[in-house]
Image (spheres, rainbow, N blue to C red):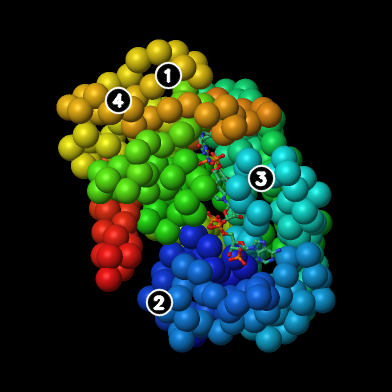
Amino acid sequence: MKNALITGITGQDGSYLAELLLEKGYNVYGIMRRKSEVTYGNVEHIKEKIHFIYADMTDPISLISAMKISQPDEVYNLAAQSFVATSWDTPLGTADIDALGVTNMLEAIRIVKPEARFYQASTSEMFGLVQAIPQSETTPFYPRSPYGVAKLYGHWITKNYRESYNMYACSGILFNHESERRGKEFVTRKITDAVSRIKQNVQDHIELGNMDAKRDWGHSKDYVNAMWLMLQQETPDDYVIATNETRTVREFVEIAFRCVDIEVEWSGEGINEIGKDKATGKEIVKINPQFFRPAEVEILIGDPAKADTNLGWEREIPFAELVERMVKNDMKLVAKEIKAANL
Ligand code: NAP
Ligand code: F7E
């Protein structure tokens, strides 16, 4: 039986990865941060099956302890301040966790168990102002946010430890992946939650920022499988994981509303753009410049050919199903909330 240590286990990807590794028979250890109230986030439903260790990416001693306790064969470093917009508000905190935190984890591995295999959660945000379309492992990086810059450090230090110490260390350059467990500030979940509230008459409209931004969106469940595959190879390497499809935020809005039989009709331009319910004429989508970013990543579309060839990785959940799953789940959650409030 293998041991795995997951940082960021309470997050979206951490939870799907923990489920996958438990299914495969791993002993799963997860790093938790101390909070004023003990909560297990997205692993609440499997908390009895996980060995939790209190640690923090910014506290190297706690990571050394986590390594000693868990004696892992595989370490998945998913912990991060992962919300791009907030990285302008907390640039140093983001760097401490997303950049130096990676070195803290790599050093802990080197000190306690250098033969442990390491996965680093790199990101398509490193491509930022894209230098090629689609983006692959050989596309030059040009990050556009403190988050992207910090993650680029994490990416290179992982490669550097692989080359310096011959460690089995890989980076997955993952494009946007979403799910029913996505945090509600990210645009996809913000939309599917709002669609569900608007449909059930507990919200009038949704306010969004850049509707023209294009993203390559997949489902988290497919992407954690790629993380595992990367650590099962003969030699460590870095891989782009993506769907090779891209859509605007506006298209995501249209498709999500269509899941609840609402057709959106657009009028106006820029900050004056408005989306109306075609059947009722009600204004259901508005632009709020508060959600624009100081620098934007306009388009992302990844080429996962290397992962397909070397890992045999393919995404199983198509885009339309991703949106439908998220809307269905939020429809249920909102209905539950309404019922509870009426009791
Ligand atoms: P997420 O839902 O925001 O989860 C982040 C996790 O990191 C949470 O468990 C959080 O714990 C933990 N964390 C934050 N700061 C920490 C610290 N100082 N010490 C220890 N743990 C800390 O993110 P996700 O979507 O699952 O993404 C997983 C990883 O993949 C992240 O590194 C992200 O940057 C990267 N990534 C994500 C995507 C995507 O589209 N989802 C794409 C590419 C790369 P709390 O519960 O205590 O907050
Ligand atoms: O924004 C635009 C926004 O916050 C997507 C993280 O997981 O993926 C994620 O980063 C796009 C951007 O994700 C709103 O300007 C418009 O262009 O959902 P997001 P992200 O920034 O792409 C990468 C790969 C990661 O690594 C990150 O950790 O949507 N947008 N209006 C909006 N975005 C938000 N959040 N809210 C809006 O109202």
Of marks 1 and 2, which one's residue comes earlier in the chain? 2
Q: Mark 3: which amino acid?
A: Thr
Q: Quadrant of the C terminus?
A: bottom left
Local crowd at mark 2 within 10 Å, few (<14), some, or many (≥20)?
A: few
Q: Which mark is residue 276?
A: 4
Q: Nearer the viewer, residue 117 or 272?
A: 272
**Residues at marks 2 and 4, CA–CA distance in whole angstroms:** 39 Å
- Tag nearer the camera, 3 or 2: 3
Q: Which residue is mark 2?
A: 45
Residue 24 in sight from this viewpoint: no
Of marks 2 and 4, which one's residue comes earlier in the chain? 2
Of marks 3 and 2, which one's residue comes earlier in the chain? 2
Q: Nearer the viewer, residue 67 or 237?
A: 67
Which residue sits at x=29%, y=60%? 338
Q: Nearer the viewer, residue 326 or 124?
A: 326
Which residue occupies the extreme top position in the image?
268
Q: Mark 2: which amino acid?
A: His
Q: Is mark 4 within 8 Å of ligand 2?
A: no
Q: Which residue is mark 1?
A: 273
